[in-house]
Amino acid sequence: MSIKVIKPTAAFASLLPTEYLELVADGPYASPKTINDLGTFKEIIAEHPHCAGCGVALGVRLTVASLPAPADTLIVGTAGCSFFGLAQAALNYSCSAFGNQNAVASGLKRMLKIRYPDTDKDVVVLVGDGGIADIGLDLTLHSWFRREKIATIMVDNEVYGNTGGQESGMTQEGQVLNMAPKGKNFAKIPVFELARVSGCVYGARVTVASPKKIGRVVRKAILLAREVGPTYVQIYTPCPTNFKFPPQQTINIAKKAEEGYYSFQEFISDDAQAYWEKNFASSTM
Amino acid sequence: MIEQRVVAPEYLFNEAEREEQFITGSEAVREAIKRANVDMAISYPITPQSESMHLVGDIYAEGYIKEYFRGENEFAVMSSVAGAAMGGVRVFTATGGPGTLRAFEAFPTWAGARLPVVCAFMTRGINSPLSIQPDTLEMAYMLDTGIIMLHAENSQDLYDMILQAFMIAEKPDVHIPVGVFVDGFFITHTRDRVKIAPPDLKLPPYNPYSAPVPVMDMENPPIRQMRDPFVMKSNFISYAAHASWQQEILAAAERSRRHIAHYLGNLLEAENETAPVMIVASGTAVSQSREAIESARQEGLDVGLVKLKSLRPFPTEELKAMTANAKAVIVPEFNRVGWLAREVRAALEAKVKVVGGPRVFGGMTMPPDLILDEIRRCANE
Ligand SMILES: Cc1ncc(C[n+]2csc(CCOP(=O)(O)OP(=O)(O)O)c2C)c(N)n1
Ligand code: SF4
């Protein structure tokens, strides 16, 4: 998308909301912005109706601030708390049935390649843990097996937040939640490991306690998905409402997890590494 | 890509010289898609649909289609098809029976997103114990998904309706999906004479910017294909937004009537419509009815026939007119529940006696004698 598409005709500019004008004049469409610039530009998400202290909201905000080409990015989502934020974002966003995101993204990505063979149009899946690890696991894995050039990002709050705090496949073993009244009796589904063996050329596991890392890995995942193959980022995004901790504790909880079971991890295939070094080695990110 | 000449749809359908071939229904699908200027097709096997999508794969390999792949299941395929259509290309797929039900959640989302997808449904049994045999039960479930439904009587219809379906689906004032339904095996796996246009002609390409909703190609200001948080809330604005959008989808189907009439001649066809006994049928039940009518005429019985081509939208007014003189209407069907009889009864508002049946299912063929028995009963009442 050219910035021209959204630029208002001068005569009509005064009729438009300030929000819109700021986005055109000072948003990330005209000149690329990164997480390091947060606070100095008009963000794509200005406000959202998530709960106070929501880790998913923060994960979504940091992710969209890390897009290498927001004007040419299409986010595919699904039902879940992540769509609260994404539905407020000035981004192309598609959401149809629960769990079908990677299949929708496959069709979109392939068709964009047909229609715009010479332009980079990024298709990014951004959804919750239930959407990826449970109801959409087969569609996610198959998009990786087929080497669809999509970046898949999970905002993992370890629970079905949107429907009122039920156990998800990404919930930790032993955790008591709705529909797990005696505690979950199996381990977190190893989606990160599955990504590695299922065709992803790059993967990263991070938490919202490390925003700069999120900025780096999201950008890398999207740039590698453009040319090399599927990529996967898993972000721990704690949910104060369903885990019943005070909203100001979200970052602390993420930090503690990062020091323990949710440590930073990254993998990259040889092809992707070679491509990265050739094209982005000088990049500071 | 194979070089083909783009011609006006009316030329391809009505004027271009046609060659008669003796081919199966699956091959008729291939011939239609060859001329449909399809950008992308996605497949997943299910008997009796599989062969048609193999053949679509073959013409992809020959260079008639730009992209083709096998998805992992029908829900995924219908979701990928949706993605492709959102992005602004002409896309085709096919399924049937359990595949239709596995994908079911996708169909109302296609209609709601105003996607002009064309999908062929080769119907078969869906209940346990597992059966691959012909049965039109799945169509009962599809009636209220918001998609336009055409029902082919034979391979000629199948060939014509698939091509016409793209033109109807893509009209800016319609722009909702079209399902072309055909009775599995009876049509897909049997040979018939089909008149087809020359293979070097094709339909005009889809123009994504004719869509009444923005295309997801990032050449428009950013758009969302979902509910806004405000609209998700339980308040009056949200109810009003959802209600008006559902009405708009219904209205789009209503607006398709004149386009269906333009391309298919009409939503139904009638013969001898002044007769006191009328048979109303769709799909292959029409062919069996023709045989029964032939025998009835030899016995001196006066019977007419209505062939329904479009089930959604339903030709209520036309059906009323075509049965105005009838004292009885017979509705033969290839399913247990009699969904077509329900539709006909609702349309005729108890003004005419509607005989729901004969019905065969589970793979049986329909002996024309069963229909003849009903004709005799109705004629002698
Ligand atoms: C077919 C279907 N089943 C169930 C639901 C209900 N549903 C909506 S969101 C959701 C849970 C989402 O959980 P997750 O993906 O972990 O995201 P979160 O809300 O936690 O961010 C469920 C079960 C649905 N929308 N569709
Ligand atoms: S329920 Fe949890 S994940 Fe959902 S908005 Fe509230 S805090 Fe965020």
Image (spheres, coloured by chain):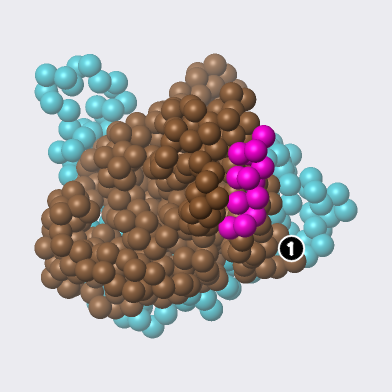
Give the vertical position of B63 relative to B175 (above or below): below
Residue bearing the label numbered 1: B128
How many numbered tags mark residues here? 1
- Frontmost residue, A282 versus B232: B232
Q: Is residue B369 magenta?
A: yes
- B227 vs B20, left or right, is right
Quarter location, residue A228 = bottom left
Which quarter of the image is occupied by the N terminus of chain B? Answer: bottom left
Residue A132 appears in the figure: no
Identify the residue at horizontal 34%, vertical 39% (top origin).
Answer: B266
* Residue furthest bottom in the image: A270
Which portion, as a residue range, is magenta? B368-381
Quarter location, residue A241 = top right
Q: Is residue B77 magenta?
A: no
Measuring from the top left, give residue A178's x and y in whole percent.
79, 45
Mark 1 residue crowding within 10 angstroms, few (<14) / some (14–19) / many (20+): few
State the predominant SS element of the stretch in magenta.
helix
Chain B: what color?
brown
Identify the residue at horizontal 64%, vertical 64% (top origin).
Answer: B364
Give the vertical position of B320 relative to A281 (above or below): above
Identify the residue at horizontal 13%, vertical 70% (top origin).
Answer: B3
